Image (cartoon, rainbow, N blue to C red):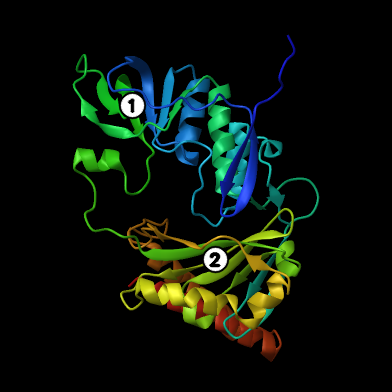
Amino acid sequence: MTNPGPRIRRVRANGVDHKFTGGPPHQPARSLAVVALTCDVLVIGGGPAGSAAAITLARAGRDVVLADKATFPRDKCCGDGLTTLALRLLEGLGLDPLAVPSWFDVSDVMLRSPTGFEVRLPLPAGSGRYAAVTPRIELDHALVDLARACGVKVYDGHGFAGFAAADSASSVGVELDGIGVVTSRYVVAADGMWSPVRRALGVANPGYLGEWHAFRQYASGVTGAASEQVMVWFDADLLPGYAWSFPLPGGRANVGFGVLRDGTRRVQEMKALWPDLLAREHVRAALGPAAVMEGRHTAWPIPARVDQAVTGLQPGSYVDLFAHFTEEFTRLVDKSPAPVHYRAIFAELADWMGRWSRAFQ
């Protein structure tokens, strides 16, 4: 009997076919209370946070179950960009970029100011990765597969249904859709800001919609600078937010924008802003004349919580950090021996940082 080789699955998302190999096929949901599961730790949520927790615990010798209501691979509305810190964390988990089909390493970042000044920032050349882009449908799937390879028992397609009676005071009972009760010593709730686990515990924030709102859509046929560079546009009407284009292999890009939920923008207005933004000359030039948008755009709220974070400056919020940075930057601009046109650019940046800090006051 011959080995059939790795199993290949095709998943269509946003008008694009993604090919995946490996991983056991998803088991269809079964009736409740058919299977009795026990483990050391139950992780609810199979995104990067949940997968990372499961991988780390399994490598430490714990018996881990990972459950998620979605069936992987699944799309996730995101900008798809990976920062230097994110890359180091993924390396620490042992994720091989070769396991992610549409991985794109970034070497340059282009920033555009509200007045149209553009600056290219090359990332360090040579060994090492400092920025990358990959669709979440592929990244999250690769992390779940890595968790499986580490011995984690993955139950995707089975969401949190509620808490159940436990066998003892030192264990927790959790009911999963289509599985039944899972008994564990600990539960890690990695099921997002609007966590069903948090809601079941009565510690959710009713009516909370996040501080930011973002739109995203994929583009194909990208031939301009956006085919290779990360583009960030600080257009005046988006401040303190911005628009972006993150490159992907094959002439594709993740294009989107994020704006502050300040009470003055309605969701309908944000939706109308999307085609206007795509039609702007600098965006069209970056994408190239042959670029077309794929599928439909998606939108999502962002729970930044920057107005409640604590910085190293003093107890407070990121407002303290930006206010402090703005003050110091403005002082440096006033004393700078740079030519007048450069000082004007620096002053504009200082003004932008000031507007950012005031947005959260």
The residue identified by callout 1 is: 178
Which tag is nearer the camera, tag 1 or tag 2?
1
Badges 1 and 2: C-beta atoms under 8 Å apart? no
Q: With 69 as the anchor, is 281 left or right in this view?
A: right
Find numbered disc 1 in the image and state the secondary structure of the residue it sits on.
loop
The residue at 53%/76% (across/down) is: 275
Q: Amino acid at mark 1?
A: Gly
The residue identified by callout 2 is: 256
- Front residue of 320/37: it is 37
* Callout count: 2
Measuring from the top left, give residue 4's x and y in whole percent: 71, 19
Q: Residue furthest bottom?
A: 340
Measuring from the top left, give residue 334's x and y in whole percent: 57, 85
Dot 1: few (<14), some (14–19), or many (≥20) neighbours within 10 Å? many
- Front residue of 347/7: it is 7
Whether residue 325 is situated above or below residue 148 in the rendered picture: below
Measuring from the top left, give residue 150's x and y in whole percent: 55, 22
Q: With 200 as the anchor, is 225 left or right in this view?
A: right
Give the CA distance from mark 1 to mark 2: 36 Å
Q: With 303 as the anchor, is 48 left or right in this view?
A: right
Q: Amino acid at mark 2?
A: Gly
The first of marks 1 and 2 along the sequence is: 1
Measuring from the top left, give residue 314's x and y in whole percent: 36, 59
Find numbered disc 2 in the image and state the secondary structure of the residue it sits on.
strand
